[in-house]
Amino acid sequence: SRQDPLSDGQFVDRRRRSSGVSFQTGEDVDCSILIDAFTSVAIMAAESEDSCKTNDMNVYYEFALIVESICAVEYARPMAMKEGVLPLLLKWLRSGDSDLERPAANAMRNLTLTQDDYTAG
């Protein structure tokens, strides 16, 4: 089995471990809920930005980098797939814009190299 790049050298199965964050209010929040929510919002925002076609392409490129980063995190990949990241990545790969093609290619590589049966196809 593969080593978790976010661990300190010991294998940690993040899907089975319940981890939380405590806020100053004393409220505990499950990190998996935060990751799922961020993944969902980021992909919806990238799709929305794509449909708006703003004049500031730097904003669009930043969304491409965010989506690339999400696809690099093993835990977030299934949610990215459920949110429909593939059509967006394919559009970026066909765009002819290297600033979109590179993050899309990296994201696709990460999605297909996973050992998770859901995202590996």
Image (spheres, rainbow, N blue to C red):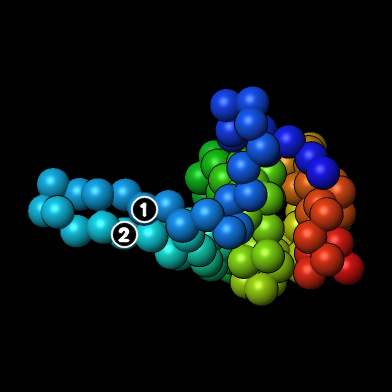
Residue 61, x across and y down, in percent: 60, 42
What residue sits 51% from the left and 45% below the top? 59
Q: Residue at x 57, y 26 (%)?
A: 8
* Callout 2 amino acid: Val
* Residue 50 position in % (x across, y down): 61, 62
- Count all numbered tags in the image, as a single digit: 2
Q: Is residue 52 visible?
A: no
Residue 85 falls left or right of residue 26: right
Q: Closest to the observer: 55 or 63?
A: 63
Categorize mark 2 by other alpha carbons within 10 Å: few (<14), some (14-19), many (20+): few
Q: Nearer the viewer, residue 17 or 57?
A: 17
Residue 111 visible somewhere in the drawing: yes
Point out the tag, 2 or 1, that comes first from the N-terminus: 1
Quadrant housing residue 105: top right
Q: Helix, strand, or loop for circle 2?
A: strand
Quadrant occupied by the C terminus: bottom right
Residue at the front extreme? 10
Instruction: Name the kind of residue labelled 1 in the image.
Output: Gly
Judging depth in this view, the residue of 111 and 86 nearest the camera is: 111
Query: Callout 1: few (<14), some (14-19), or many (20+) C-alpha neighbours within 10 Å?
Result: some
* Residue that badge 1 annotates: 20
In percent of width and height, residue 100 lies at: 73, 44
Residue drawn at point x = 83 percent, y = 66 percent: 117
Image quadrant where residue 66 sits = top right
| Marks 2 and 1, how far apart at CA | 5 Å
In the displayed structure, 74 sits above or below 117; it is above
Image height of 21 relative to 87, above or below: above
Query: Which residue is under mark 2?
Result: 29
Image point (66%, 73%), residue name: 82
Near-viewer residue (65 or 40): 40
Q: Using the image, determine if residue 4 lies above or below residue 114.
A: above
